[in-house]
Image: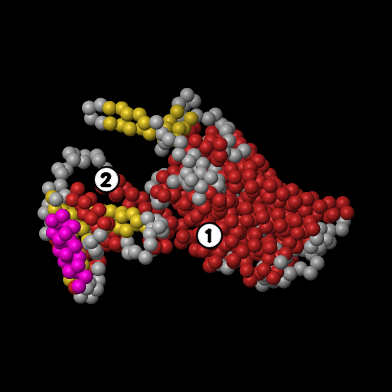
Amino acid sequence: MIDHEHNSQTSIIERTADYVPPKNWRSWFIGRPLSTADASHQTIGKTVGLAVFASDALSSTAYATQEILVILAAAGTMAFGIVVPISIAIVILLAIVTISYEQTIHAYPDGGGAYIVARDNLGEFPALIAGASLLTDYILTVSVSIASGVAQIVSAFPELYDYRVVLSVGFIMFVMLMNLRGVKESGTAFAIPTYFFVVLMFIAVGTGLFRLFVAGTLGTVIDPPELLAHGISTVTPFLILHAFASGTTALTGVEAISNGITAFKEPRSKNAGITLIWMSLILGSLFLGISYLTKMIGAVPSESETVISQLARTIFGGRGTLYLMLIGATTVILIMAANTAFADFPRLGALVAKDGFLPRQLTYRGSRLVYSRGIVALALIASIILIIFQASVTRLIPLYAIGVFLSFTLSQGGMALRWYKIGKLRPDEEKVERGSTLRFVKDWPVKMLVNGFGAICTAVVMLVFAITKFKDGAWVVLILIPSLVTGFWFIHRHYNNLAKKLSLDNFGVIPPHTMRHRVILPVSGVHQGTLAALRYARMLSDDVTAVHVVIEPSDAEKVRAKWETWGEGVRMVLLDSPYRLFIEPILGYISEIAAKRQPGETITIVVPEFVSDNRMTGALHTNTANILREQLKNQHGIVITNVPYHVHEEGVE
């Protein structure tokens, strides 16, 4: 349907059409394209939301206890007894962070991640720090969770140890492909494995507690693996803080739901808040249960066998069916933990890009209504990191939690400041600040204290982690985050400068038309394609010059003779090329013309381009137009135009 509206100045044409993109190879991998109108149907409920956004946090139960033991092992196995008090302290911190983010979810129903909260309440620079921290955390989430999942596989099948890097990259590509299919579809596909893991883990912990307290037959680990470290230190406050910092990796992923509120069905804030509470209750209970049982059975940290593997074969009496089911479920949930990052990284990247601090391409949604460029970028970066660190969880963990706790601190600090500003309003007053509406809330002092206390706690943990893990590799993140912020500013400055250059504000009148338009037509031979380009060139201007580069003098005479017959009186310039070069003589000629160009003169290079319907034969021809465009695109007042000449080769003898 075409509708025309006319007035004396303009003619506006609106066109709507039911265009359905054709099926291609992408459709087989990621599904049929979805229209923008389908966006509202791609939202998810609480059950699927738990699988999409909580898999990262829930999966940390598979390695958080082990990371505490890795640090305590420096003081010998006797130090393993304090794993439970440390775990209790971490669960208390989890409760504080959960309450803080539950408030954030309701205050920012359109998405209240650390970047948005910091931008609205603390300013641009803290927001960029929060954004860089979270982007770093999401990348490391993929690397750590995939590496940990592969470690579970290696525990069950030691012969695969040498292939752990290949397996890790393969799993990243699989999760990337699933996320390119869309949030709803990937969430539905991952929901069953998530709940399978949760049920099996509760069965394992419940069975272990039953055997310990009722049957009294739990026992200890049979044939425990070799310790990563042993007895080289004593239990000191620094060692305890170090172990506590390692265990706080259990909290990574708690902020994911606040970043992905827009993916939930209405009422979004209520559904997201309930999902956050579900996640924290499951995470806290499983983490405490695993830590307690690990202490009771005498499990030890090792690269060759995970603590979960030792716990499972002790509880289930060997490597039987239940053991393999639990290891399989743990592997799946660890691999799926990367799905949380794949759900949030592209969203955060799009927000930062929308503000002009990342490439604008990250704001474009793909055919399945997901930010496909962000998904692919995350997969590639995480794969590179896994290859560099050889898929070692122990080597990756020190890089992991600083970024997330820094973002926790900025988010909760920003929320505390928000409640303080709200407290200064009258009960009937509203205020718009940085695009966010502040409305008076009666219980603002309680909310401010909750978020403020949460900010202090997470800041302390961040400092402890930075200090205790500095030598282990945390210094990399402390350099990476400032580097990312610097990159953000560089990109933002470019976009701002470009906007100023292109702005129509104070532009004045439209400049006068070009005084002269000169057209140059490179000619390699005289044929139908050349004449089509010549006709187009003459439509642009009467000042047309054909240019032929003389490689072989005998061929030049043939070209000259044909041009005199078919060239329609247009002058031709022959350029000698004693070194048999084609592009360089043309560039030299154009440079001479450009140097003598008059003010307001435009030079257009019209290049005949052979286009074949056969891709294989098309590759046999030089794309002169693209080569010239690459060489001349930075020169002002020069335009490159290619005139396609289509040849249908079917039936040609």
Look at label 1 and name its amino acid. Answer: Ala
C-alpha span from label 2 to label 1: 37 Å
As drawn, is 326 to the left or to the right of 269? right
- Identify the residue shown where x is 56% and y is 58%: 173
First to last magenta residue range: 554-574
- Quarter containing the N terminus: top left
What label sits on residue 26 in the rendered view? none
- The percent position of residue 180, horizontal first and vertical second, equals 54, 50
Which residue does the numbered mark 2 point to in the structure image? 502
Look at label 2 and name its amino acid. Answer: Leu
Which residue does the numbered mark 1 point to in the structure image? 382
Residue 483, image quadrant: bottom left
- Identify the residue shown where x is 52% and y is 37%: 38
Secondary structure, mark 2, is helix
- Quarter containing the C terminus: bottom left
Residue 367, visible in the rendered structure: no
- The percent position of residue 286, horizontal first and vertical second, equals 71, 50
User: Of all residues shown, which one is farthest toward the top?
Assistant: 428
- Identify the residue shown where x is 21% and y is 58%: 521
Q: Nearer the viewer, residue 145 or 649?
A: 649
